[in-house]
Amino acid sequence: MLSQRISSVYKRITYAALRAGRNPEEIKLIAVTKSHGIDKIKEAAQLGLRIFGENRVQEAKDKIEDLKEFFNKWRMNIEWHMIGHLQSNKVKDAVRLFELIHSVDSEKLASMIDREAEKIGKVQRILIQVKLSDEESKFGIKPEDTEKLIEFCSKLSNIKLEGLMTIPPYFENPEDVRPYFKKLRQMKEELVQKGYSLRELSMGMSHDFEVAIEEGATMVRIGTALFGERIN
Ligand SMILES: *Cc1c(COP(=O)(O)O)cnc(C)c1O
């Protein structure tokens, strides 16, 4: 049952935080609803979840429209996060739909977001997606190019950079992912030392979020552990 899965995930978040000497309240749960229908999302919202993550703009757009009335009726303050790769031709919609875009990985994308945000009088919150391995298929900026992108973003007045995000390679054993989470945390700390204001670390998914929390995650993106296997 969804209610049990939610409490189990919260419990695991809490214990991972406590093991690391952290306040569990520092950690935000992003419920990843891609491929799941709006009835699941309604149920999750009624059970208290407030931040939903989607990886496709069109899918998110349809769901957000369909859910608008429901969320208004119950006066639920829902946040939608874009966690997938963002294509140029979807930037306009994304800026209108999402409170936070986790996947900014180029100056071009940052400029486009800034321009669209300006048009609607918004300051778009973003994270920079960092690619910590050489896997060809993954998006994200290289660690050595990250500071330059941050510097670039800091000059754009309609975006607000809040932190870093990563999707590490998959390992059967979550312990093997730890070095990647550690690396992202170290990058953040070094950048903060240099004076950049970065609060968030978006890292950790269903099978490795506890390790991510031990290494400093402030946002965990969890789908399967909450909603079960995806249908597609
Ligand atoms: C699908 C997805 C998740 C959630 O994955 P689960 O393993 O189902 O928890 C997290 N982050 C991103 C970027 C995703 O695309």
Image (tube, helix red, strand yellow):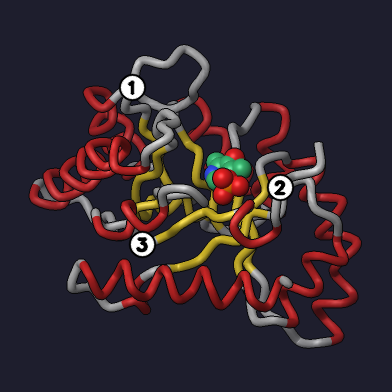
Dot 3 crowding, Cα within 10 Å, few <14, some 14–19, many 20+: many
Mark in the foreground, 2 or 3:
2
Along the line of sight, the residue nearer the viewer: 54 or 159: 54
Q: Nearer the viewer, mark 2 or mark 1?
A: 2
Q: Is there CB contact under 8 Å for labels 2 and 1?
A: no
Would you say residue 135 is visible in this rendering?
A: yes
Q: Is mark 1 within 8 Å of ligand 1?
A: no
Give me the residue at 62% from left, 53% from top. 223
Picture coordinates of residue 207, whole percent (x, y) = 47, 48
Q: Can you give x and y, in whole percent of width and height, for residue 101 in the image?
A: 54, 48
Between the residue at mark 2 and the residue at mark 3, the CA separation in whole angstroms equals: 24 Å
The amino acid sitting under disc 3 is Thr
Q: Secondary structure at mark 2?
A: loop
Q: Residue at x 81, y 42 (%)?
A: 231
Which numbered disc flags the more N-terminal residue, 2 or 1?
A: 1
Residue under pointer 1: 133
Residue 147: image quadrant is top left
**Crowding near pointer 1: few (<14 within 10 Å), some, many (20+)?**
some
**Where is mark 3, residue-wise?**
218
Position of the N terminus by quadrant: bottom right
Above or below for 119 versus 38: above
Residue to which mark 2 is pinned: 229
Dot 1 or dot 3, earlier in sequence: 1
Secondary structure under tag 1 reads loop
